[in-house]
Image (tube, rainbow, N blue to C red):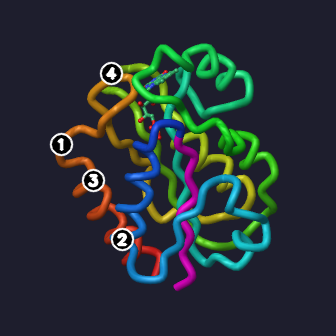
Amino acid sequence: MNAVVVFESLWGNTAEVARAVAEGIGPGTRVLSTSEATPEVVAEAAFLVVGCPVIAFGVPTQQRLEGVRSEVGRAPSDPDLTQPPLQQWLDGLAPGTGRCAAFDTRVRGPFGSASPKILRALERLGYRPVAKAEAFQVKGKYGPLRDGELDRARRWGQELGRQAA
Ligand SMILES: Cc1cc2nc3c(=O)[nH]c(=O)nc-3n(C[C@H](O)[C@H](O)[C@H](O)COP(=O)(O)O)c2cc1C
């Protein structure tokens, strides 16, 4: 199965989850940032998994990332702001017929979500979900991931791989 995990990650937490999910799906699964996941690469994928951090209660947009820019220097490390925000990547995504899944990373609490919105956007484009939108939690605003979350991401990936096959 040609599977691709696409992620946006500012501080690396979502990237770690994306790699663990890909490991669970199985060998050959590619893990690509929003700048690497070109329309050509995505068009070839039979299974597309998409993930991002929750920023300002939702999917990262240019506007939401302005808020992140204002934190540069105050955060424990600098965010990677070189990738297109996930919303922009989704807006440029062509219709598809493959299977799909979505996840986000976030703090614990009722502070918004991103994965349900990603999944709805993918469905509107014709992709068919194999699982409910998933979330993985970090300990603080900038991470790290809570204990056990990478194992859970790997197991989730295994289940996705079975469902998508
Ligand atoms: C500027 C900023 C805004 C955030 N806003 C939210 C939020 O609204 N809701 C939430 O659950 N988590 C929020 N978080 C926590 C991030 O979603 C979390 O740390 C995420 O794992 C970061 O992923 P990354 O390391 O891949 O960038 C925010 C973090 C930052 C730095």
Mark 3 vs mark 4, foreground winner is 3
Give whichever of discs 1 and 2 has the lower sequence position: 2
Give whichever of discs 2 and 4 has the lower sequence position: 2
Mark 2 to mark 4: distance in Å?
Answer: 28 Å
Give whichever of discs 3 and 2 has the lower sequence position: 2
Give whichever of discs 1 and 4 has the lower sequence position: 4
Rendered position, 20 above or below 70: below
Residue at image location 53% in from the left, 72% down from the top: 30
**Is the C-beta separation of discs 1 and 4 under 8 Å?**
no
Mark 3 to mark 4: distance in Å?
Answer: 19 Å
Residue at image location 42% in from the left, 68% down from the top: 22
Dot 1 surroundings within 10 Å: few (below 14), some, or many (20 or more)? Answer: few
Give whichever of discs 3 and 4 has the lower sequence position: 4
Residue 27: horizontal and vertical position, in percent?
41, 82
Image quarter of residue 97: bottom right
User: What residue span does the magenta drawing correspond to?
Assistant: 1-9
Q: Which residue is mark 3?
A: 150
Which residue extends farthest left?
A: 147
Viewer-proximal residue among 84 and 118: 84
Residue 69: horizontal and vertical position, in percent?
63, 21
Dot 2 surroundings within 10 Å: few (below 14), some, or many (20 or more)? Answer: many
Residue 149 lies in the magenta stretch = no
**Is the C-beta separation of discs 1 and 3 under 8 Å?**
no
Mark 1 to mark 2: distance in Å?
Answer: 18 Å
Q: Which residue is mark 2?
A: 23
For label 1, the SS is: loop
